[in-house]
Image (cartoon, grey):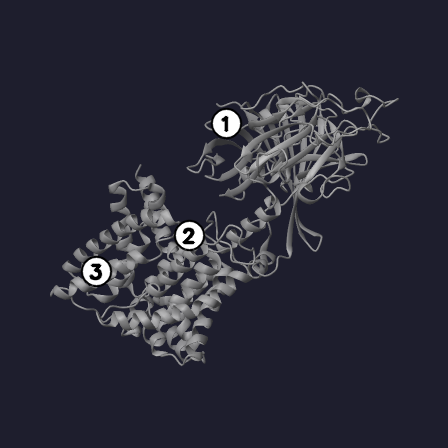
Amino acid sequence: MIAEKLKFYRDGLAGSYAQVFFSNDRRFAFLLILSSFVDPCTGFSGLLSALLALMVARWFGFSPALIRDGTYSYNSLLVGLAIGLYFKMNGPFFLILVLGSTLTLFLSVFMVAQLEKCRLPILSLPFLMGTWAVLLSTRSYGSMGLSERGVYAINELWRFGGEGLVAFYDKLSHWTILPAVAIYLKSLGAILFQYNEVSGLLIAAGLLLYSRIAFSLALVGFLTGLLFYYLVAGNFTELQYSYIGFNFILSAIALGGFFVIPSRRSYLLVILTTPLIGLIMSASGRLLWTYQLPLYSLPFNLIVLLTLYVLSQRSKTSKTLQPELVEVQQFSPEKNFYRHHNQKQRLSNDSYFHIHLPFFGAWYVSQGHDGNVTHCDDWRFAWDFVVTDEMRKTARPPGTSPSHFFSYNLPILAPAAGQVIEIIDDVPDNDIGMVSLAENWGNTIVIKHLDHLYSKLSHIRKGSFQVKPGDYVRKGDFIASCGNSGRSTEPHIHFQLQATPFVGSRTLQYPISYYLAAEKQSCRLRAFSYPRQGETISRLAVTPLLRQALCFIPGSTLHFEVTTTNGGSQRVLWEVLVDAFNQSYLFCHNTGSVAYFRNNETLHYFTDFFGDYNSLLYYFYLGAHSVLLGYYQDLELTDHLPLDNFYPGSLKLLQDFLCPFHVFLETSFRAVFTQIDDPDNPRSITVASESRALVANSIKGSMDFLLVFTDNRIHEFTVTEKGRTIMARRVEPS
């Protein structure tokens, strides 16, 4: 119990420091703690204030997750640092520290709840309000003596690091260094109330370690701010005396890569908004001087919040040339970029609502979008489907009756769940070669799936409907049979999507979610695509074994016995859980790792991974990245893996710097079915998959996997990498 509490507070303290720079990296947090103790009194005051905030937050029973990640306490940390710098340590000092930390905590809790409604962060607003409250109130308290720390830097460095650090500082001071670099380093240090280059160097090193994008953004923002001051002949003493240039740095990181997806557009956004920060710095500085209050991070807060709010008010149809907001925060500009990049590669065409083909078996697209017969103008986005033989003939001899045609009387299926809106069922089938122009659509059904999304199927056989208006249907329900009514010379299915419920509505361009397209001796999986005229396509059939094996029910557990080539073995336990956003994930009890997944009844695929990249769960995340729930012997399933944490060494570091502008690294995932015991009623299926890291088509890293599914569950999982093999066998709970 004590160990758990200590771990909780350790994580909370690390989060408090890291959150100042929009991070959750513990290594970065350690360097920030170290840099804050260049002035030991200031550092100790900040550490104590953060710890007090964590303890009070836990005592009040606030959200454990937000306490642990530092959300509620990082502003109290900043207030503690400010109090430690301003005042001498005595009895009243610690009383004010406790009160200031608690007040800031309450402000943080309140603002998190309120700003979250607008999907806006609190940034350092609680710090500003808490610090200003302390500074204004203590003017009436005679026992609060002002400190001279921050004035005599040499004395503070001596206390922190002795003669060695003073000598280093002296050498640094006499080094031929550009004044802009000195201001930059001191501005970095000023974020933690350390007005010296040593703290700035430590923070810069931590920033580079944490994020190459954040490091470059900090430089871009600061240099743009200096250029603005130069162009308007601004008062440089504002930057040199108080080092408030950190407003440029923090704003650049926030708007360039943390709240906005890193890209050319986000860097341009930083360059465009930085002069606004300079404007606010000068204006608000004069206003606050009236009350003798420091400016601190007010410009950063105002401009970042204003920009984020403005970006959130854009039309959903706004052009993609504009900066894109981060939807799911990864607490790293690189991870934000790589996740977004991976999602665009994998799911860029994914529709909110999945529409499936309205038939069983293989059908030929006799007319597609922009067809040369009837699919034009307002009805251009439609398909005509027929069944053919190997010679592309649509009927058996003599072909003079609708019943001679392969398509005739075959079942038509509901393309998705919905409500039947309208049915026409009084048009007889035409003789072959004849059409009924007066009854253009023939017998027809219209199904409502969503507001502004309807499907329409036409030329249906009279009297074959299995549903009536008002009925609710599920995906794949038998609703009618193919006929030859209306403007139809031979039996076929006319299928279209539309935004309105009327039989003559204009068509809507909307993709088919998943289907198979025949290619010579094999087939190819198409996802969220549009069947093309001349293709033979088929609806995917799900194999019960795969569907059951990959149906992870919340609360269930998976136990594995894991062995490696070096002879080591261990038991691994996974549990299926659901988060507050109703997202399912696998949780590894051994490592604390998490792998988020989705199962859309056609495909089981992973979306995110957090945790130990040497864990079995990470290997499973890679090896089962995408698994089709239907067995097809000749089908090759391909996908993309996220770039982060898959590449070794310097290549990844270089890509981190360049990724907002150019991605030169590639990843690939491929999976094939290699074995099945009984195609008609399988009890065992084996899937082989591989993950590759490539540069210019040259393989830089690879892993191979085997997944064996037996008796409706995962039976065995094998990983091979660089001659090392890991085998995990499913076992019963001990």
Q: CA distance from mark 3 to mark 2?
A: 31 Å
The amino acid type, in three-letter code, at marker 2 is Arg
Quadrant in which residue 33 is drawn: bottom left
How busy is the neighbourhood of tag 1: few (under 14 within 10 Å), some, or many (20 plus)?
few
**Which is more N-terminal, label 1 or label 3?**
3
Residue 587's mark? Answer: none
Q: Is residue 428 left or right of residue 274?
A: right
Q: Label 3's element?
A: helix
Going from N to C along the chain, the mark reached first, 3 or 2, is 2
- Badge 2 marks a residue whose secondary structure is helix
Query: Does residue 470 appear anywhere in the picture?
Result: yes
Badge 3 is on which residue?
133
Q: Nearer the viewer, residue 529 or 156?
A: 529
Residue 553 got which mark?
1
Picture coordinates of residue 561 (x, y %)? 55, 29
Work out how far the residue at label 1 is from the one at label 2, CA to CA, in angstroms: 33 Å
Q: What x and y, as percent, mark residue 301?
A: 36, 61
Residue that badge 2 annotates: 26
